[in-house]
Each structure stands twice: as C-alpha cells, then as structure tokens.
Image (tube, rainbow, N blue to C red):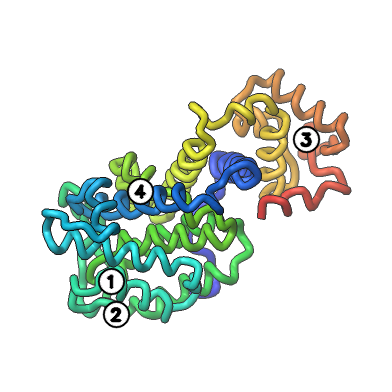
C-alpha cells in the first residue's frame, strides 16, 4: 500500500453521492443545532454507541445504554455494560484524537476494550478470521507480523492523499477491516475512526449517528464488505458507506426523503453532481449526464445547454462528439465541498 492508492474506482454513483452529501451537510450546518444542542448531542451519542455495539451482538437496548450512562443499575451481562462505558469514554475523547497517529489508534483501542481482552491497546499477536453476524467467515486478517507496517501505511495514505475525505474515510474503513489489526474490537474501531475522519472534514459528524444507519442496514454492510473482498477492491463498500452517510444526513434534516429542499432547487444538486464529475474527468458528454443524473437524453441535453448558457460550462468537441467542460472561471468550483 505504501506510496500507492489502495485499489478502488471512482464511479458516477460515488461522485453523485459526494456532491449530494456535501450539499446536505451545508444545509444542516447552517440550520441545525447539532453543534450546540446538548440534549440532541447526547441522544445521538447514545444512538451511536448503541448501534455500533449492537452490530457486535451487545444485548443492551437504547434505554439500558442510557441508564448505564446515567449511573443507574442495569441487569445485563457485565461485559455488555463495560462495552457501553468504554465506548462512551472514547467517543467523549473524540475531539482530542489524532486520526493519523498510530499511538492514538492504540490508545483508543485500549479504552474501547479495556478489561475485556488481553491485548487491549496492542496489535494482535495471533492470526484471526473475520466473521459476520451469522458466523460466516468473510476473510482471514493480515498475518500479525505485517499488521503494524500496514496500519502505519494506511494512516499515512489517509493523511497525505488529497482525495475528498468522504471517499478517503470509506477507503480507510474498508482497508482497516481487511487488515483486522486487533484481536477484538475491530468493527467498533473501524466505525469510530470513520466518524473521526469525517469529523475532521466537518464537525457535524461528531454528533451524526452514522453507526445507527449501518446497524439498520447491517446485512447490506456485510454484503458490501463481501462484494469488495471478492472484487479485490473497495468500490462497493465505498458506495454502500456513502449511501449510509447520505441516509443519516437525510434523517437529520427531519424530512421524509431528505431532499425536499434539494428537490426545490434541482439545478443546484445537478450542478454539484456535474462539477464533481468534472473533477475526475476532463469533460462530460450527454451519455455521462444521463447516467449521472438519472434523466433522459433530451433532459440531459437541456441541463447541459442550460449550464452552458449560465456560463458554468463550455461546449467543446471531443473525439468527434460534442462535450462540455468547466468554464475557465469555474475550475475551482469544487473547492467548496472539500
């Protein structure tokens, strides 16, 4: 992995979702009290912890998780109670964690599984198989002697690559689970670190319970991991995680489909998708716009012509066909979603 990108492809679905997520984040950040409302913050934090632990078969309900964190007596397995207390402690440390530090990663793992496993805060010393909720083996983790170097290389790639954080965080999540660096707690740590990385892009993600969406779509989560394992690259997992992040943002807007405002301003959403596409491609053609926006050929042509009339696109000839590219004064458009 060192000095090269982990294997994955940037698809039109990924580009479109990144643009939509960026727009939703902007809307929520400007109108929501997520960053200042302690009651909502705590509610979402409890949901996050409950969901992330429930994926790992923790038996406590949301009500019991709340009671544990309020210091009340709860009749439940001591291990499950300890998992809640440990997870809450490390999530409360979120704003102090360096997402690119191996020492920080080990520190966080030490708290997450404190008193629960022998190798808390240490990379595993033995081989391990990775199983899903039904006990099916997904893959075998990296041999233990290679784990430290691979984790360091993954953290360095995540820090140094200039790709959008929405994509990088998904890649990290998948590659982390593939390495499976710890004897236990890998799923919890992967989801924690995914949230941590996203929070460095936008603080909203400290309070956004992405884990609860994964919990609701747990079979899809494992299926995406399986599909990526079979393909030998993380594209399907990236697409799933972006869809989960988008769903969590949709929920946070308090709207039924999360796109009511966007639907009232389709041009903005369509432009964000086209602009994101042009970040990865030199030009866009009618067929690309049809697939990217899910519209007919006539509608795609009307959209492209419209943005050309607005001065956002320039019409060019490419490979004998008409295509469109950024106008010279709009090449930096995507800076707003980085």
Determine the residue positioned at 31% across, 63% down. 87
Residue beneath disc 2? 122
Q: Is residue 232 left or right of residue 97?
A: left
Above or below, 213 against 300 in this view is below
Between 81 and 315, the one lying in front of the other is: 81
Q: Which element carries disc 4, helix, strand or loop?
A: helix
Locate the C terminus by quadrant.
bottom right
Q: In whole angstroms, how far apart are the C-alphas of marks 3 and 4?
A: 47 Å
**Residue under pointer 3:** 323
Q: Against 322, is 238 above or below?
A: below
Separation of marks 2 and 4 at Cα, in angstroms: 28 Å
Foreground mark, 3 or 1? 1
Cβ–Cβ under 8 Å for marks 1 and 2: yes
Q: Would residue 206 appear left or right of 188 to someone viewing this image?
A: right
Q: Which residue is mark 1?
A: 182
User: Can you give x and y, in whole percent of width and height, for residue 222 in the image?
Assistant: 30, 47
Sort mark 2 into few (<14), some (14-19) or many (20+) by Cα contacts within 10 Å.
Answer: some
């Amino acid at each position: 992995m060192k000095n090269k990108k982990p294997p994955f492809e940037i698809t039109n679905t990924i580009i479109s979702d990144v643009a939509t997520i960026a727009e939703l984040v902007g809307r929520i950040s400007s109108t929501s009290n997520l960053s200042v409302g302690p009651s909502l913050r705590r509610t979402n934090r409890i949901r996050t912890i409950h969901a992330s632990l429930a994926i790992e078969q923790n038996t406590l309900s949301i009500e019991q998780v709340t009671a544990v964190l309020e210091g009340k007596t709860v009749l439940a397995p001591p291990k499950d109670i300890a998992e809640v207390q440990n997870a809450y402690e490390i999530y409360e440390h979120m704003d102090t964690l360096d997402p690119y530090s191996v020492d920080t990663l080990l520190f966080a793992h030490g708290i997450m599984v404190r008193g629960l496993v022998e190798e808390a805060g240490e990379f595993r010393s033995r081989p391990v198989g990775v199983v899903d909720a039904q006990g099916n083996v997904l893959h075998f983790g990296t041999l233990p002697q290679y784990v430290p170097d691979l984790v360091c290389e993954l953290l360095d790639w995540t820090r140094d690559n200039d790709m959008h954080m929405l994509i990088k965080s998904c890649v990290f999540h998948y590659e982390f689970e593939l390495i499976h660096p710890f004897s236990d707690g890998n799923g919890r740590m992967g989801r924690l670190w995914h949230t941590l990385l996203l929070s460095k892009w936008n603080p909203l993600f400290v309070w956004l319970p992405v884990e609860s969406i994964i919990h609701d779509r747990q079979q899809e989560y494992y299926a995406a991991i399986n599909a990526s394992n079979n393909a030998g690259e993380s594209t399907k997992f990236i697409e799933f995680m972006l869809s989960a992040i988008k769903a969590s943002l949709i929920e946070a807007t308090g709207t039924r489909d999360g796109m009511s405002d966007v639907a009232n301003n389709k041009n903005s959403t369509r432009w964000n998708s086209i602009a994101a596409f042009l970040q990865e491609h030199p030009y866009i053609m009618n067929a690309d716009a049809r697939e990217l926006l899910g519209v007919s050929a006539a509608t795609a042509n009307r959209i492209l012509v419209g943005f050309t009339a607005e001065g956002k696109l320039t019409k060019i000839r490419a490979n004998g066909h008409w295509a469109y590219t950024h106008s010279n004064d709009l090449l930096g458009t995507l800076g707003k979603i980085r």
